[in-house]
Image: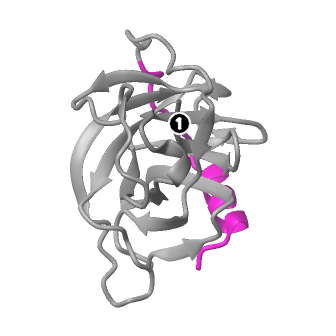
Amino acid sequence: MISTKTIITFLSAVAFTQAAPSPAPEENLSPRADGEIQPSYRAAHSINWSYQNYCEAPTSYGYVYRNVYSGQEWGQSALYTFTYPAASAGKQCWLEFYHAQPNWISNPAGVQIDVFTSYAPTQCNTGSMSNNRDVNLGRLNVPATGAATWAATYSTKLTQRGPCPAPGSVQALELVPVGDNMGISYPQDVGKGLRILYA
């Protein structure tokens, strides 16, 4: 497993030159709702397959980054599994990413992250380390601190309010870095990180 300290040390050593993303044409994501669904399972996926996926605790820190260093591409995406609770039955659900303190970001003007569905939840250390990437839902503009906005959406699923699936349904998602020299770390906990909100 690559440690948090190793990732931060590596990222800090690289000169990030990505231009700031253009301002989002959309308004901020919907305000906090009656409830939120935190991921029941998280994993990190190596962009260049240089190391295995590894499992993380449900509440910890997330890391998404991509760099080209000495001719080698390095980076990782973040994989999530959400399970819809009984409390979300009959309500509207949507996705939110909130970049809370303490955090780290390569560009103080913000970075961009793509959100994909996965056709099946990723299982760590099973011999199959696929990220199971499926449909691109949209691209987020993530600020140094605060709620992300949609720079672009390619589906209405979770990018806007819509009927929540039945309780017990599972949704697998992947956060993917945009650009060659970018990085972001963030706390993943109640009110922070990637969440599915419902009201």
Q: In the image, 9: left or right of 137?
A: right
Q: Residue at x 54, y 57 (%)?
A: 39
Quadrant (top left/top right/bottom left/bottom right) for the N terminus: bottom right
Q: Which residues are magenta?
A: 1-21
Q: How is the image coloured?
A: one colour
Q: In the image, 17: left or right of 114?
A: right
Regarding mark 1 in the picture, which secondary structure is present there? strand
Residue 193 drawn above or below residue 79: above
Residue 90 on the magenta span:
no
Q: Position of residue 140 (x, y in %)?
A: 42, 30
Residue 177 drawn above or below residue 17: below
Examine the image and state in which quarter residue 51 appears: bottom left
Q: Residue at x 22, y 30 (%)?
A: 154
Is residue 62 in sight in this rendering?
A: yes
- Most foreground residue, 141 or 173: 173
Q: Which residue reaches farthest bottom? A: 127
Q: Residue at x 52, y 20 (%)?
A: 30
Residue 162 drawn above or below residue 194: above
- Most foreground residue, 4 or 26: 26
Q: Amino acid at mark 1?
A: Leu
Residue 9 on the magenta span:
yes
Q: Position of residue 8 (x, y in %)?
A: 67, 56
- Most foreground residue, 169 or 124: 169
- Most foreground residue, 75 or 167: 167
Residue beneath disc 1: 197
Q: Residue at x 30, y 51 (%)?
A: 117
